[in-house]
Image: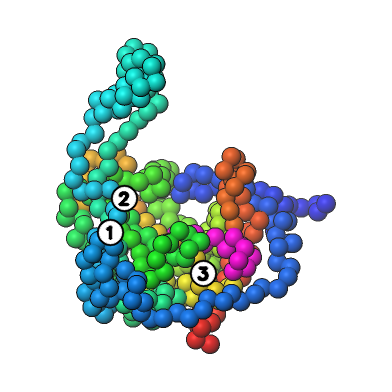
């Protein structure tokens, strides 16, 4: 046994200051998985257009309406949204009626009386959610992912995100705009045509709410921005830095859970995409292309992931929301999360099971090792080499 603790050899936990959660690192387990050949997967032909794809130009969608002959990004309302803009307001009576209908049918009596009613009020807490869902097709090309697009083409995507945020910020039912992309069947993507989704809700979802609380606590304690300090620290240490440009860095977070998880962070404090300058928009597009290209080159495959953008709460419904920290609208620091599932090849995935579900998150590859492997990857896509 070594006389001194080594991060690359010994088990340890790392705390995520954004969500106040922990991840168990077991780096000694990573010395076995890298043995063996890495096979290039057969992805087959990737046509630019498919007549039966409901996201390609001119094709009918499942609702029957046809897409226009779009030539750049294209935005439309999700045909199967997770929520609706208009619905009846939730009241406790709805839960009581729901409980009474089930207990009456089982012969258990009225559960809305007395002690059961009090317990139910504490344990069955419900809030209605209103919002709207939109889909953004990155381009008319059915096969061209962010990794294969030019920086200028991705600029159009980023500007579409910004335009959507500005428009949704005027809607009275909006408090938060969550932009995310699920890429690949491994991440549950039902259509391979490159696209992302925008979910705008009248509440602040759990993850950004937790981050906002952490930002607020850190600022109270140190008087500075958590993410500004973190970005400066990572740029100084460079161990987990994958790539950077004038406006953004891409790092494997110190507390990463997924094997090749990364985070894109604005170098200068910026709370929302709508505040980005033209230069920063271009640089965000640049670093998106570079990290997604590195992902694809890591295992010579179209790398699956879930990507999401975290920015300040937005819109009229954020006002007065305790999770929004409306007293400091500049509290949030713009950043993007990438959560990819691949572990050691194009066909071996990391699953959060067992201890991860019942204890806490666990990983075998340290953040430093993952960053080193990603730094070694080319930023020229393997399909174009």
Q: Residue 380, image x and y in percent?
A: 50, 83
Mark-to-mark CA distance, 2 and 3: 26 Å
| Residue ID at (45%, 68%) | 249
Q: Disc 1 vs disc 3: Cβ atoms closer than 8 Å? A: no
Local packing at callout 1 (Cα closer than 10 Å; few below 14, some 14-19, many 20+) is some
As drawn, the label of residue 78 is 1
Which mark is on residue 68? none
Nearest to N terminus: mark 2 or mark 3: 2
Could you tell me if residue 48 is visible in this image?
yes
Is label 3 in a helix, a strand or a loop? loop
Magenta-colored segment: predominant secondary structure: strand
Q: Secondary structure at mark 2?
A: loop
Mark 1–mark 3 distance (CA, rounded to whole Å): 25 Å
Image side of residue 308 versus residue 168, left or right: right
Q: From the viewer's perspective, is the residue at label 1 or at label 3 nearer?
A: 1
C-alpha distance separating marks 1 and 2: 9 Å
Q: Which residue is mark 2?
A: 82
Spot occupied by residue 248 in the image (x, y as percentages of width and height): 41, 69
Q: Which residues are magenta?
A: 337-349
Asked whether 255 or 383 is in front, the reply is 383
- Looking at this view, is 297 or 313 the one in front? 297
Q: Which residue is mark 3?
A: 303
């Amino acid at each position: 046994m070594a006389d001194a603790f080594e991060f690359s050899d010994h088990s340890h936990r790392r705390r995520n200051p954004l969500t106040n959660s922990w991840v168990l690192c077991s780096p000694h387990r990573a010395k076995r998985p890298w043995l063996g050949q890495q096979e290039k997967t057969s992805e087959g032909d990737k046509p630019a257009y498919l007549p039966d794809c409901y996201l390609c130009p001119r094709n009918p969608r499942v609702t029957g309406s046809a897409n226009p002959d779009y030539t750049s990004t294209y935005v439309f309302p999700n045909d199967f949204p997770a929520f609706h803009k208009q619905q009846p307001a939730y009241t406790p009576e709805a839960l009581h009626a729901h409980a009474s209908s089930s207990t009456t049918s089982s012969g258990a009596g009225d559960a809305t009386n007395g002690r059961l009613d009090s317990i139910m009020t504490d344990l069955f807490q419900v809030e209605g959610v209103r919002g709207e869902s939109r889909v953004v097709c990155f381009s008319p090309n059915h096969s061209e992912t962010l990794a294969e697009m030019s920086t200028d083409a991705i600029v159009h995507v980023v500007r579409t995100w910004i335009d959507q945020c500005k428009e949704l910020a005027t809607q009275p039912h909006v408090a938060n705009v969550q932009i995310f992309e699920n890429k690949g069947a491994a991440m549950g993507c039902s259509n391979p045509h490159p696209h992302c989704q925008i979910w705008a809700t009248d509440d602040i979802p759990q993850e950004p709410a937790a981050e906002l609380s952490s930002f607020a606590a850190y600022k109270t304690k140190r008087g500075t921005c958590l993410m500004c300090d973190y970005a400066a620290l990572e740029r100084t240490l460079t161990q987990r830095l994958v790539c950077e440009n004038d406006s953004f860095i891409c790092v494997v977070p110190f507390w990463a859970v997924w094997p090749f998880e990364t985070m894109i962070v604005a170098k200068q404090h910026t709370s929302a995409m709508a505040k980005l300058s033209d230069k920063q928009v271009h640089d965000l597009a640049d670093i998106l292309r570079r990290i997604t290209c590195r992902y694809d080159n890591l295992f010579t495959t179209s790398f699956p992931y879930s990507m999401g953008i975290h920015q300040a709460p937005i819109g009229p419904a954020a006002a007065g929301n305790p999770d929004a920290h409306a007293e400091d609208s500049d509290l949030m620091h713009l950043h993007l999360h990438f959560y990819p599932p691949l572990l050691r090849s194009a066909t071996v995935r990391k699953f959060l099971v067992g201890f991860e579900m019942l204890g806490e998150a666990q990983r075998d590859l340290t953040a430093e090792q993952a960053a080193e492997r990603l730094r070694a990857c080319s930023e020229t896509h393997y399909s174009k080499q």
